[in-house]
């Protein structure tokens, strides 16, 4: 696919990016024992930069490669999936962003503990965060080896494993050294490079078809082996028993799950006040909308210029479609300038991979240090908690890297789906109830987090992503008993139901006490209004210890 000079150029670019970004983390990381600086960067980012950082956290390597592949192979259904990602961020913007910023301090555990304090709540919130982010983290770590091998022309399994170990160590360094501000700068650099290089590729593809989107879609349908079905709804789930319900389940999972994943919601705590969080989210939604447009054009362009057979031959799930489409946009023979532009595309993907996992490791490390270790007994000193947060990055990252080397040879699409299902079925109901329902109790919260997570884990084992098809995680086994690709159609309503049930079964006296606790801080959570200092510490910017 590429000549030696292009591969050398890519290797030099990757090395330069890794060096520069690590240097940025060292320069911008906290230089004193201040938890506020490590966890939130003192809210020092402007709304534009914070919005770009939110978009960078939201757009993972799995989003770029996976969504591009679905668009290239499935057409209309893939574009709907991409639009759902933008809709998910809009949901976060209009419903959850401001209350999250008011209620939270450093982690999602702080949000829940604002109205239902207790170690059990914090430990459960930490467990839910780890369970939701670990699957998608594994996918991106495992994909690091495949992506590097594909870009640099290596086929050795040892090379892939070495890439996972090396890049994983770099990602741990980003989180442990840079903290929130350091990882934010990397996310900003990533989103600018991704959108800039992607816009150039999209323009080149449209130029190949005389700037006529209709001609592009017609050419893609002609080479998709699906004909007109490529341009209509239902192709992605046509092999299942309930394709329409399966599609609804998938879209519901993406919309609710993507908005509530902890590495995205943690960026809400970095805004200094409500106006800033609204402006930040405006920048984030605009950036994601631009990404949706770009990935749609590149994905359809890959189908039109490369063809389904070549895309599926390179990767059955189409994860290389974005790169294949970008390469085809430059034509069969690239000039030096075009080689530099293509290297910019591959470097943007490389940086996307690094930044995405670094953000997830940081979110996991923050909750492990702040919600578990820092609340075991006496309050630790800032120096000790900062040390715990950095050690937690190592404690989260090392097992994830080792697990990624074990599972990297399998189809890991079920793990991406599982993360979104957990976000929609456990975290979304817990956040909505905690922020807006006065009667919600500690029991309801625990039932939501534990029951919603358990439902996802159980139901996912029965989907056709895990077994029963050649493209599943275990293609030689068939224990497919759940009729949908995602669990959302069942597990999301179940998560809300369990929260309601746990609440109504709480003894009346405990209900009244916990409702009074919420009403005491309701004005602060929903509108940032000053509140009395009972039942706990003063809610100064939501940063008081909970």
Image (cartoon, rainbow, N blue to C red):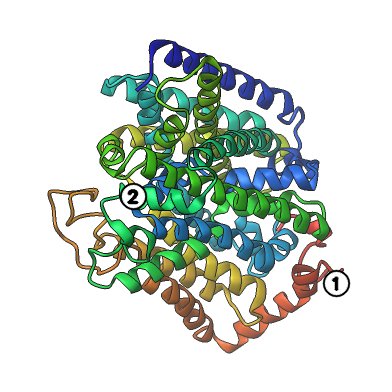
Q: Is residue 539 left or right of residue 264?
A: right
The answer to which of 480 and 65 lies nearer the viewer is: 65
Which image quadrant is residue 536 in? bottom right
Quadrant of image for the C terminus: bottom right
The foreground one among 201 and 390 is 201
Inter-mark Cα distance, 2 to 1 = 57 Å
Query: Which numbered dot is residue 73?
Result: 2
Identify the secondary structure beneath mark 1: loop
Q: Going by the image, does 267 lie left or right of 127?
A: right
- Front residue of 22/220: it is 220
Q: Secondary structure at mark 2?
A: helix
Q: Position of residue 502 (x, y in %)?
A: 49, 79
Which label's residue is closer to the chain start, 2 or 1?
2
Label 1 CA crowd tier, 10 Å (few <14, some 14–19, many 20+): few
Crowding near pointer 2: few (<14 within 10 Å), some, many (20+)? many
- Check the image and report above or below for 481 versus 8: below
Give the mark count. 2
Q: Can you identify the residue that label 1 sits on?
A: 532
Which residue is depicted at the point 55% across and 26% down?
Answer: 344
Rendered residue at 63%/28% (across/down)? 177
Q: Nearer the viewer, mark 2 or mark 1?
A: 2
Q: Which numbered disc covers residue 105?
A: none
Where is residue 493 drawn, in percent x and y?
44, 76
Residue located at (61% from left, 53% from top):
289
Residue 322 x %, y %: 43, 39
């Amino acid at each position: 696919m590429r000549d030696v000079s292009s591969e050398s150029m890519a290797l030099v670019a990757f090395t330069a990016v890794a060096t520069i970004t690590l240097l940025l983390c060292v320069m911008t990381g906290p230089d004193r024992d201040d938890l506020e600086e490590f966890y939130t960067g003192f809210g020092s980012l402007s709304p534009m930069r914070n919005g770009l950082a939110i978009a960078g956290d939201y757009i993972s390597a799995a989003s770029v490669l996976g969504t591009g592949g679905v668009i290239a192979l499935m057409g209309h259904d893939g574009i709907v999936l991409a639009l759902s990602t933008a809709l998910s961020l809009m949901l976060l913007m209009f419903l959850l962003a401001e209350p999250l910023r008011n209620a939270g301090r450093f982690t999602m555990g702080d949000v829940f503990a604002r109205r239902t304090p207790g170690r059990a709540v914090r430990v459960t919130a930490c467990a839910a965060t780890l369970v939701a982010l670990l699957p998608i983290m594994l996918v991106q770590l495992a994909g690091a080896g495949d992506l590097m091998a594909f870009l640099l022309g290596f086929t050795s399994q040892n090379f892939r494993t070495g890439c996972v170990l090396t890049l994983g160590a770099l990602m741990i360094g980003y989180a442990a050294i840079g903290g929130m501000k350091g990882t934010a700068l990397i996310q900003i650099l990533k989103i600018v490079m991704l959108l800039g290089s992607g816009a150039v590729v999209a323009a080149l593809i449209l130029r190949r078809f005389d700037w006529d989107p209709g001609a592009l879609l017609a050419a893609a349908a002609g080479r998709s082996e699906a004909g007109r079905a490529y341009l209509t709804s239902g192709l992605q789930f046509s092999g299942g028993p309930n394709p329409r319900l399966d599609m609804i389940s998938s879209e519901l999972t993406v919309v609710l799950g993507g908005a509530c994943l902890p590495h995205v919601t943690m960026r809400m705590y970095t805004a200094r006040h409500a106006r800033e969080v609204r402006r930040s989210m405006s920048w984030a939604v605009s950036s994601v909308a631009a990404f949706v447009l770009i990935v749609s054009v590149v994905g359809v362009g890959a189908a039109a210029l490369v063809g389904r057979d070549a895309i599926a031959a390179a990767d059955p799930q189409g994860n290389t479609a974005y790169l294949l489409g970008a390469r085809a946009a430059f034509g069969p023979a690239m000039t030096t300038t075009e080689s530099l532009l293509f290297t910019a595309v591959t470097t943007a993907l490389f940086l996307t991979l690094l930044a995405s996992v670094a953000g997830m490791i940081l979110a996991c490390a923050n909750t492990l240090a702040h919600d578990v270790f820092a609340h075991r007994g006496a309050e630790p000193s800032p120096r000790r908690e900062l040390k715990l947060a950095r050690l937690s990055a190592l404690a989260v990252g090392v097992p994830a890297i080792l697990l990624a080397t074990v599972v990297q040879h399998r189809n890991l699409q079920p793990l991406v789906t599982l993360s979104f299902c957990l976000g929609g079925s456990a975290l979304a109901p817990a956040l909505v109830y905690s922020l807006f329902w006065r009667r919600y109790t500690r029991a309801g919260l625990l039932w939501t987090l534990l029951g919603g997570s358990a439902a996802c884990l159980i139901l996912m084992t029965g989907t056709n992503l895990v077994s029963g098809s050649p493209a599943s995680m275990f293609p030689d086994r068939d224990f497919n008993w759940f009729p949908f690709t995602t669990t959302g159609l069942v597990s999301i309503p179940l998560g809300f139901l369990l929260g309601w049930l746990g609440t109504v079964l709480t003894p009346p006296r405990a209900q009244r006490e916990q409702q009074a606790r919420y009403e005491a801080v309701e004005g602060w959570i929903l509108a940032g209004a000053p509140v009395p200092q009972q039942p706990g510490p003063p809610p100064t910017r939501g940063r008081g210890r909970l």
